[in-house]
Amino acid sequence: MTNHNTPAQSPAQFPAPPSRPLGGPAGPPVKTGPRVGLVIWGLVVALLGLWIVITASGFTIDGQLALIVILGLGGLSLIATALISSFRHAKR
């Protein structure tokens, strides 16, 4: 139940907390942009779509081999980007 005798408090009465401690260091900048994993999986999906278009055009592609190659390249690129990222963080 609400009490109609007390005025409602507006958000202006409650100041927002500081985003960092006052007088403290700003910290490292936040990385923005697409994540590498999402880009790689997007490429995998795009290659699968291209494969569908090519097979619909009448060309024959070995489906099992194509899937093995696409997923293998996607997995290798995910591993490579993880290793590169870990080497970059180790240098800091």
Image (tube, grey):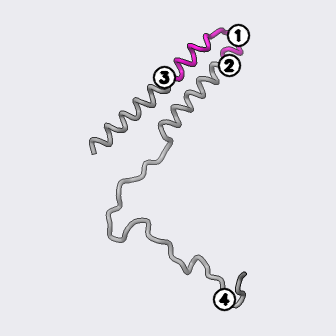
Frontmost of labels 4 and 1 is 4
Frontmost of labels 3 and 1 is 3
Q: Position of residue 18 (x, y in %)?
A: 44, 69
- Residue with the mark numbered 1: 58
Q: Earlier in the sequence, mark 1 or mark 2?
A: 2
- Residue with the mark numbered 3: 73
Q: Earlier in the sequence, mark 3 or mark 2?
A: 2
What residue appears at the point 56 percent right and 32 percent down from the top-left corner?
A: 42
What residue appears at the point 32 percent right and 39 percent down from the top-left corner?
A: 88
Which corner quadrant of the image does residue 46 belong to?
top right
Q: Amino acid at mark 3?
A: Leu
Q: Disc 2 versus disc 4: distance between alpha carbons?
A: 66 Å
- Residue with the mark numbered 4: 6
Q: Position of residue 55 (x, y in %)?
A: 68, 14
- Residue with the mark numbered 2: 53
Frontmost of labels 3 and 2 is 3
Q: Image height check: is 5 above or below 13?
A: below
Q: Earlier in the sequence, mark 4 or mark 1?
A: 4
Q: What type of secondary structure mainly makes up the magenta span? A: helix
Q: Earlier in the sequence, mark 2 or mark 4?
A: 4
